[in-house]
């Protein structure tokens, strides 16, 4: 059963994180990297339940692209099969990426699940680019994910 995402409460990645309650596929935990979880392969998914939003929700992710040399990473985001956004990082380090997800994209039936897919077509293994023996197809390291009603943030300020 999918877990509820609470408005503004983060999903934390890494060995000590809570992300496994929502992770469906495409995630790889490296015990030497306690505070991150890698996308492993071209697709990673989170499945969750949330009340039907009254407004578009702000999705915020703290993440960093894998430095695959000439293979520049891109992240396509889909919710329930609908295109949300495309992000092409301009930095190699960790940053915060935010976008709005239309309220109409969320499943509105009571207890209906939502499937959030991250697609990274340029995932590549460190072995392929001469960066060690790791065979996983890496693209992005995730630290934190949050869904937030932006009007709630304004009311809290």
Image (spheres, rainbow, N blue to C red):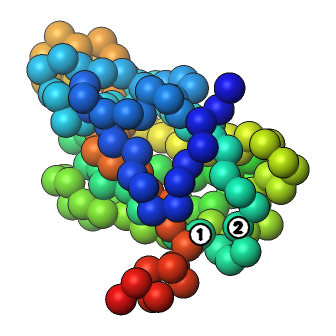
Q: In percent of the image, x 59 and y 36: which residue is there?
A: 3
Rendered view: 47 above or below 84? above
> Would residue 31 be found to the left or right of residue 58 on screen?
left
Q: Which mark is residue 53?
A: 2
Secondary structure, mark 1, is strand
Q: Which mark is residue 145?
A: none
Q: In percent of the image, x 19 and y 36: which residue is there?
A: 35
Residue 11 appears in the rendering: yes
Q: In percent of the image, x 37 and y 64: which residue is there?
A: 97
Rendered view: 122 above or below 24? below
Q: In percent of the image, x 47 and y 50: which residue is there?
A: 75
Q: Which mark is residue 57?
A: 1
Asked whether the residues under the numbered discs 2 and 1 touch, taking CB atoms below 8 Å apart as contact, a structural biologist would say yes
Secondary structure, mark 2, is loop
Spatial separation of the CA atoms under disc 2 and disc 1: 7 Å
Query: Which one is in front in this view, the residue at disc 2 or the one at disc 1?
Result: 2
Q: Position of residue 147 (x, y in %)?
A: 51, 60
């Amino acid at each position: 059963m999918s877990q509820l995402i609470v408005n503004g409460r983060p999903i934390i990645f890494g060995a000590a994180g809570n992300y496994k309650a929502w992770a469906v596929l495409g995630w790889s935990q490296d015990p030497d990297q306690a505070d991150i979880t890698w996308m492993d392969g071209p697709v990673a998914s989170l499945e969750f339940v949330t009340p039907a939003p009254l407004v578009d929700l702000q999705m915020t992710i703290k993440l960093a692209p894998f430095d695959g040399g000439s293979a520049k990473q891109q992240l396509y985001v889909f919710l329930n099969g609908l295109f949300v956004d495309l992000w092409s990082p301009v930095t190699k380090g960790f940053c915060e990426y935010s976008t709005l997800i239309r309220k109409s994209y969320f499943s509105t039936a009571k207890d209906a699940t939502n499937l959030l897919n991250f697609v990274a077509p340029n995932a590549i293994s460190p072995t392929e680019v001469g960066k060690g023996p790791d065979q996983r197809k890496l693209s992005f390291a995730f630290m934190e994910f949050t869904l937030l009603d932006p009007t709630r943030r304004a009311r809290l300020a």
